[in-house]
Image (tube, rainbow, N blue to C red):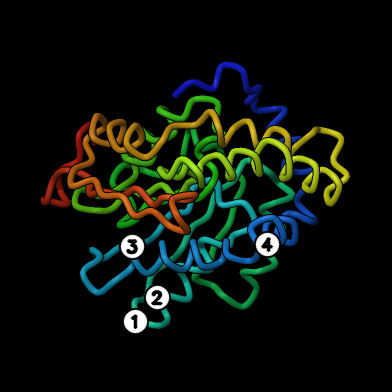
Amino acid sequence: MDSSSVNKSPERVRRMFDAVAARYDMINHLLSFGIDASWRKSAARRLIHHQTPEGDVLDVCSGTGDLSLAFWKRQRRINSERTNFGIDFSQKMVEIAQKKAKDRPSLQFSVGDALDLPFEDCRFAVVAVAFGLRNVCEPQRGLAEMVRVCKPGGTVAVLEFSMPTSPILRHCYQFYLSTVLPRWGQWFSRNQEQAYHYFSESVQQFDQPAQLADRLTQLGVGNVQRQPMTFGIVTLTWGQKWGIDPRYCPGG
């Protein structure tokens, strides 16, 4: 996980996301040609089902709350009552998420640090992050925190951009990431922090799914699986925290 050339200082990351928050959803929909919603919906369908252990759900680096909303909609569809918590570093992003959660008491958003989650050990049945882990200055520590607050037998999941395996698609995608996306994103956002140049760099330098799967395994997550989406430009990586007795939690 080599992110040494990308400045991920907490101050910079917070400034960037506060600055783009008002247009964040619109720009994401435009730059992904509207398919970003389907990625979250697919992740929610994979992670929330009738066999999912009882317990609440945590969305780390929740941004404007779209993954939590996808979880909430999925739970309503299968009559699974859970409280969904979202936590994000950016106050502006959380404020937008809280507006989306209006009249939905099972959706709760707050400001917090992914490197020091304000929850007790073994708290959640599902702990997930979508397109946010690469923005954390210490991704491995962030993953460790996700595992810590997950129940034994619960699910830890990462939905993140990845590189297609097809050489032709990979070349086209890298061109889009390095040339098209930063220019369009910067034009739409009018952001002085060069947020979409950062976005492009962080995607290209972050772990690929196999590396991410290895890191989860090292942290005590078993049965790790991967689901590529849209020709592999996005991958859901997930697995179960070791342990089946809910009374047991290492360090608890």
Q: Earlier in the sequence, mark 4 or mark 3?
A: 4
Above or below, comparing residue 38 to residue 120 in the picture:
below
Q: CA distance from mark 2 to mark 3?
A: 10 Å
Disc 4: which residue = 29
Residue 42: give x, y in percent of width and height: 42, 66
Disc 1: which residue = 78
Nearer to us: label 2 or label 3: 3
Q: Earlier in the sequence, mark 1 or mark 3?
A: 3
Which residue sits at x=56%, y=16%? 4
Task: Indicate left or right for 97 with 122 as reference.
Answer: right
Which residue sits at x=53%, y=35%? 134
Residue 157: give x, y in percent of width and height: 36, 49
Badge 3 marks a residue whose secondary structure is helix
Q: Nearer the viewer, residue 138 or 189?
A: 189
Q: CA distance from mark 1 to mark 2?
A: 5 Å
Badge 4 marks a residue whose secondary structure is helix
Q: Are marks 1 and 4 in contact (CB under 8 Å)?
A: no
Q: Which mark is residue 75?
A: 2
Name the outermost residue toward the top. Answer: 4
Residue 55 falls in image quadrant: bottom left
Residue 133: give x, y in percent of width and height: 50, 38
Q: Residues within 10 Å of mark 3 (few under 14, many from 20)?
A: many
Amino acid type, residue under disc 3 in the picture: Leu
Task: Indicate left or right for 94 with 153 as reference.
Answer: right
Q: Are marks 1 and 2 in contact (CB under 8 Å)?
A: yes
Amino acid type, residue under disc 4 in the picture: His
Disc 3: which residue = 47
Q: Earlier in the sequence, mark 2 or mark 3?
A: 3
Amino acid type, residue under disc 2 in the picture: Gln
Amino acid type, residue under disc 1 in the picture: Ile
Q: Residues within 10 Å of mark 1 (few under 14, many from 20)?
A: few
